[in-house]
Image (cartoon, rainbow, N blue to C red):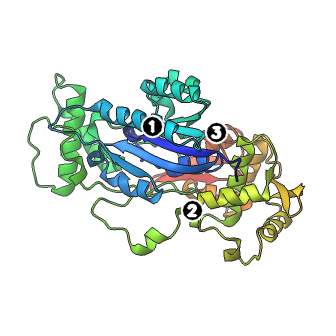
Amino acid sequence: MDLEERLAVFIDYENLALGAREHLGGMQFDFGPIADALAVRGRVVARRAYADWSYFDEDRRMLTRHQVELIEMTQRMGASRKNAADIKMVVDAIEMAFERDYISTFVMCTGDSDFSPLVHKLRELNKRVIGVGVEKSTSRLLPAACDEFLFYDRLEGVEVPDEDQGAPAPKRGSRSRRPASAPDRAAAAAATAQKAPTTSRRAKAAEAVAEAVAEASAPDASVPDVVVEPEAKPATRRRKKTDPAPVPVEVAPEAEVETDVSEHEEEVPASSDAPMEVRVAQTLADLQSSTSGAVTASALKRTLLRKDPTFSESDYGFRTFGEFLRFLADRGFVELAAGPSTGDPEVSLPEQGDTDAAFVLLRDVVRESGGSAALSGLKNAVRKKRPDFSEKALGFRGFLQFAKAAEAAGAVSLAWDDDADDYLVTA
């Protein structure tokens, strides 16, 4: 335990949230994949996110679930204070570096190159620095300054919409919180096309969003032909919730602004819906990729507890964690070998195989589903058969891209189904 890294996480939330919405098909930012990635790198002792939270009302609950401290940087009198959160974040990081020697690693969640001097100073103070940012909104200067940089859209658990599926990304000033539904997008596109060509692009987008919201809430109401300020009371507008992509990793689907989450939903861990062998395989794969040595059972257990503090092998009917691992080993989910001490074996994953083998696996799963299956639930079915499956480990950005590659290789066929509003995979 004494050799574990102690991590402090600082989040430039506006940079990450707007970067995800603008460059990742309008998707909602989720801190869960970042939390999982950091869990295998050490013990997180501080989590702070900086923003004017009046613009991110729906995001507060997601961050609170992950025990993130919200630092409020309020915009006053309509004045622009873009750098206020950045300055506060820098001051707090430097203060923590001097006052808390036990913190060995600083995690800077931002893609802004303005933080490069901070990164250099932290490294001068003998601190390790890990950066996290959305790839397309991250400055090229920042990753080179860090000891390690994680692109959010490459993390396990982040399902980036494909270009032909994703909603158009909102403008930076729009502060929209959710991707628009299909009727909203159509209405916005039609309204934008009817505007005079002399209207600016930003004004067109603002008017289109205003008209779409007005039509959804009151079909008979007319929209005044004025330019709506894009930052005017975004938190009071109810937006239609889109269904989150079904992935077997921890996600934090957002409720609507005016809908309260029940007490039962607050108490249930977000990762509890993933099968136990999937959770173990994913955690073990992350540990193997982030450490140079072998992974022991004790290290695996500590990491599982970081991801879900309620995890207990007794919930699955096992007396000890070693017995739990032997059960998984007997079924081919993991492999065990003699470890550095008695009762602490080394744990590893079976060889996953190459891309062709993964295509065959996909085809077999589709055939077992009756010859056809919807893409949205197919990844769960694949992982039930091979818990260590990861399309990102094979070099694909998302499961849709993996399925298209399997189609190009002749393993399956892929076609869009308008009735199901999803791809249909056949074999």
For label 3, the SS is: loop
Circles 1 and 2 in contact, beta carbons < 8 Å = no
Task: Give the residue type at disc 1.
Answer: Glu
Distance of mark 3 from mark 2, alpha carbons? 23 Å
Task: Give the residue type at disc 2.
Answer: Ser
Residue 191 seen: no
At a point 72% along the width and 46% down the height, the residue shown is: 411
Quarter residue 378 falls in = bottom right
Q: Residue furthest right?
A: 338
Residue on which the image places disc 2: 271
Image position of 283 (left or right of 202): right
Number of other residues with Cα within 10 Å of mark 1, as a class: few under 14, some 14 to 19, many 20 or more: few
Whichever of labels 1 and 3 marks the residue nearer the N terminus, that label is 1
Whichever of labels 1 and 2 marks the residue nearer the N terminus, that label is 1
Residue on which the image places disc 1: 95
Q: Nearer the viewer, residue 99 or 219?
A: 99
Quarter residue 143 falls in = top right
Dot in front, 1 or 2: 1
Number of other residues with Cα within 10 Å of mark 2, as a class: few under 14, some 14 to 19, many 20 or more: some
Distance of mark 1 from mark 2, alpha carbons? 34 Å
At a point 48% along the width and 40% down the height, the residue shown is: 96
For label 1, the SS is: helix
Residue on which the image places disc 3: 396
Dot in front, 1 or 3: 1
For label 2, the SS is: helix
